[in-house]
Image (spheres, rainbow, N blue to C red):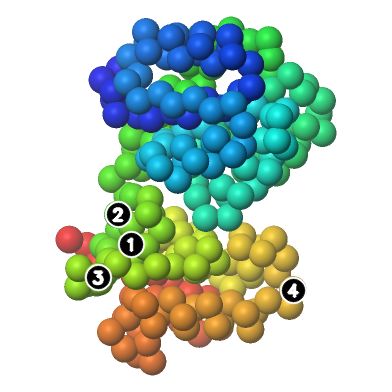
């Protein structure tokens, strides 16, 4: 698969032989950008300094649990994560998927099975790659960087702003109810409506020419919000 050439993978595991074997296996299968890490600290360094498309993540690491890294990532990132662990209990798997892991593979494993799962994610990634930058009026929402670009100026988003905007972008040109946004962002529709209104206005300040007369992130009275993308 030619698209493997530009698909970057970070393999996180404290087993030296496993890291070396997976590195060589993935190289042989056509992946060119493969990074490895043995600890959470090293993983964070690689994530901060390299563009990573997918992480193969062990859970039992010398300086903590892989779940900690997964939770950190899901605060502001949708990087694909395949958990690769000797922990095979149902509670471990449940925790992995509850924290939005894309897949969970138990050791010992067949390398080809891991490859099939990576390829499945790669195919999905190829389909959505064109949507990583969304043009909203005269603003570009760059989902990979978590920023807006307006008049060539990069505008940062908070983690909550990014999550709200990403969720609305997944439902572009569709009305999304307040309850659905609350459930998706806070996992609880009770008590956060005023907080959501504040976040929406702050997003509009960054997104709209006139936040008091929004044209892109609009309120549908009595129903919810809609992120508007005009046909190009």
Q: Which residue lies under the disc numbered 2?
A: 133
- Is residue 96 visible in the rendered image? The answer is no
Q: Which residue is pictured at 51% across the width and 32% down the height?
A: 55
Q: CB of mark 3 within 8 Å of CB of mark 1?
A: no
Q: Which residue is pictured at 51% across the width and 8% down the height?
A: 21
Q: Which residue lies under the disc numbered 4?
A: 190
Q: Nearer the viewer, residue 151 or 11?
A: 11
Q: Is residue 119 depicted above or below 185 in this figure?
A: above
| Label 2 – label 1 distance at C-alpha | 6 Å
Does label 4 or label 1 sit earlier along the sequence?
1
| Label 4 – label 1 distance at C-alpha | 29 Å
Does label 2 or label 3 sit earlier along the sequence?
2
Does label 3 or label 4 sit earlier along the sequence?
3
Q: CB of mark 2 within 8 Å of CB of mark 1?
A: yes
Mark number, residue 153: 3
Q: Secondary structure at mark 3?
A: strand
Q: Is residue 7 depicted above or below 152 in this figure?
A: above
Q: Secondary structure at mark 4?
A: loop
- Residue 40 at what x, y percent from top left? 62, 37
């Amino acid at each position: 698969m030619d698209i493997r050439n530009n698909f970057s993978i970070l393999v996180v595991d404290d087993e030296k032989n496993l890291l070396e074997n997976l590195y060589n296996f993935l190289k042989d299968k056509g992946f060119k950008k493969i990074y490895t890490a043995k600890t959470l600290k090293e993983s964070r360094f690689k994530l901060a300094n390299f563009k990573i498309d997918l992480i193969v993540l062990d859970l039992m690491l010398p300086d903590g649990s892989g779940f900690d890294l997964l939770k950190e990532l899901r605060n502001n990132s949708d990087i694909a994560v395949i958990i690769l662990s000797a922990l095979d209990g149902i509670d471990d798997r449940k925790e992995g998927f509850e924290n939005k892991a894309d897949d969970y593979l138990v050791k010992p494993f067949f390398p080809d099975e891991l490859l099939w799962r990576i390829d499945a994610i790669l195919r999905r990634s190829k389909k959505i790659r064109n949507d990583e930058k969304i043009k909203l009026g005269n603003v570009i929402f760059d989902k990979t960087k978590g920023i807006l670009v307006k008049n060539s100026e990069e505008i940062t988003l908070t983690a909550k702003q990014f999550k709200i905007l990403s969720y609305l972008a997944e439902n572009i040109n569709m009305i999304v109810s307040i309850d659905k946004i609350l459930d998706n962002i806070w996992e609880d529709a009770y008590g956060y409506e005023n907080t959501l209104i504040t976040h929406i206005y702050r997003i509009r300040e960054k997104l709209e020419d006139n936040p008091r007369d929004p044209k892109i992130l609009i309120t549908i009275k009595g129903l919810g919000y809609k992120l508007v993308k005009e046909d190009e």
